[in-house]
Image: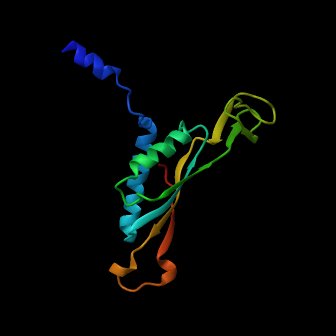
Amino acid sequence: MMRFLAMIFQAPLPKYPAMHELAICQDVLSQVRHLADKRGASRVDRIVVIIGPLAGVEIPLLERAFSVARSGTIAANAVLDVESTDIVVQCRTCSVRSKASIGKLTCGSCGDWRVDVRQGEEMLLKTVELSVNTDDQLPVDPASTTSTLRSSGHV
């Protein structure tokens, strides 16, 4: 019995996406499914998210997780586009807003380290492109068969 267990543990583990990024994808797809249901969409073609550098998300892992999470959903063939933002801080000393970097969160004007992050931590669902199957519905304007929804809500 012990030998059998040892052999099981020697088998390589499958490479699954990180749990954090997978949970994010599941949340995004839940929001997208809700939007698609409200619009009567037959499929999701494209999803655009905005992720700041300080959001704690590894983009390559998010893309891998998305390919796993989308299977079997209305977004099974959807493309995920990730847009990044700059880090913007506001100095508590001189009140200047300036760009910063991950390794240097300081004021770009006076160099002080006492700053508040104003941009760069966000994770937003920006755009969802939906397709509506017009065969199953009343006639509609052809220009409205693909709709783009914009959301500024947090993911």
The residue sitting at the top extreme is 2
Q: Give the colour scheme shown.
A: rainbow
Residue 59, image x, y percentages: 55, 42
39 is higher (above) or lower (below) than 108: below
Q: Horizontal and vertical percent for residue 112?
A: 75, 28
For the question of whether residue 17 can be seen, the reply is: yes
Q: Residue at x 65, y 36 (%)?
A: 116
Q: Is residue 50 left or right of residue 45?
A: right
Q: Image point 79% across, 30% down: which residue?
A: 111
Relative to residue 91, is residue 33 depicted above or below? below
Residue 152 visible in the displayed image:
no
Q: Position of residue 139 (x, y in %)?
A: 39, 86
Task: Judge whether 46 appears above or below 114 on screen.
Answer: below
Residue furthest to the bottom? 139
Q: Nearer the viewer, residue 30 or 12?
A: 12
The one nearer the camera, 16 or 109, is 16
- Quadrant (top left/top right/bottom left/bottom right) for the N terminus: top left
The residue lying toward the viewer, choosing from 8 and 56, is: 8
Q: How many marks?
A: 0
- Residue 39, position in %: x, y? 40, 70
In this view of the protein, which residue sits in the foreground, 149 or 152?
Answer: 149
Left or right of 147: which side holds 36?
left
Which quadrant of the figure has residue 55? Answer: top right
Image point (41%, 63%), residue name = 35
Q: Residue furthest left?
A: 1
